[in-house]
Image: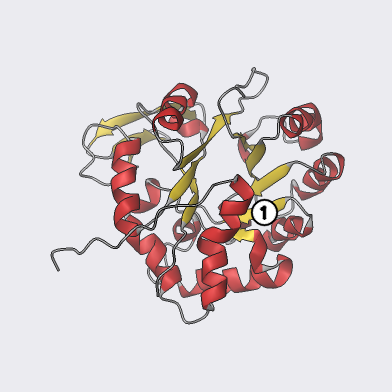
Amino acid sequence: MSIDTIIDAHLHLWEKQDGMIGGLPVRDLGHGKSSFLGEARQMMPAYIDDGRNTAERLLGNMDYACVNACVVTQEYMDGNQDLYLLSVREKYPDRFRICSLYEENDAYRTDGFDGLKICASRLRDRDLKKLLPVFKDIESRGMFISIDLADGAEQTEDMQYLIDRCPNLKIAVGHFGMVTADGWQEQIKLARNKNVFIESGGLTWLFNKEYYPYPSAIEAIKEAAGICGIEKLMWGSDYPRTMTEITYKMAVRFILETPRLTEAEKKAFLGENAKKFYGFGDFKRLEPIPNML
């Protein structure tokens, strides 16, 4: 089937990886590998041998997979990429939305950014109610919040507290509610609130043991749609980490090819919902690029 609008609601870029996780540094080791919790992990496809996860490399993948636009979120393990993302947004304004990174007890940037990323599961103080001034500030600026929550229902009560007090704030809950953890449905229920959506960044990672074409991931999408409605769900790839196992095009194809979703559901999930949520305009149609096979 052909879908005119596909938007990736969760991916990562970095010019130089310089982050921390578990108190240990995350650094490029070459050929797509990075140091991670004291050992080498494949963080990108092995052919990316210079450690640079750039917008230009991503755009080549997007064009080949007919993905019109994307939302760049951030993670502590990659280090703060605010300045690089501002340069990307300036060069490619029609294809990118970008998030600045919230770092605990530090000032965060808003100028030039579309949203703020909060890695709630990695905060030292897990009481999200204390972030009310941050949420109110982002709401007043007309920006959105992208947030990855701790597994299950640990932080959902705090999130509802914040949602109730910021009714006009757009919030995207990431990693499909950490769908393989017990109680993931409680995060999906948050999208019953008017301006809260769920994005599926990392879905193929969470179901990686099952591998392509991820039938359990499709069933999770069906279950989530039954909880909050398909109109509240958005596709995301979690590029480039998920591309160590599959290609970027495969991250789209398993949705396009499944018989378990209707054409209307696929259009909504892959692009129409994200277009409305992130405020993208109309796109020029991307024609499929024939390959050598």
Residue type for callout 1: Phe
- Whether residue 150 is visible to the viewer of this picture, yes or no, is no
The picture places residue 181, in percent across and down from the top left corner, at 61, 59
172 vs 226: above or below: above
Within the image, what quadrant is residue 122 found in? top right
Quarter holding the C terminus?
A: bottom left
Q: Quadrant of residue 222?
A: bottom right
Considering every residue shown, the one lying at the far left of the view is 292
**Residue in front for this viewpoint, 291 or 220:** 291
The residue located at (35%, 63%) in the rendering is: 250
User: Whole-percent x and y of residue 17?
Assistant: 38, 28
**Residue nearest the observer in this picture, 129 or 33:** 129
Q: Quadrant of the N terminus?
A: bottom left
Near mark 1 (Cα within 10 A), the count class, few <14, some 14-19 or many ≥20, is many
Residue placed at 59% from the left, 34% from the top?
114
Which element is circle 1 on?
A: strand
Specify the farthest residue to the bottom.
259
Q: Is residue 223 visible?
A: yes
Residue 196: % across, % down: 72, 51
Count of all numbered marks drawn on residues in the image: 1
Left or right of residue 128: residue 10: left
In this view of the protein, which residue sits in the foreground, 283 or 33?
283
Look at the image and name its color scheme. Answer: secondary structure
Q: Is residue 134 above or below residue 169?
A: above
Give percent across and percent down for residue 65: 34, 58
Q: Which residue is mark 1?
A: 197
Going 74% across and 46% down the picture, which residue do you hit?
155
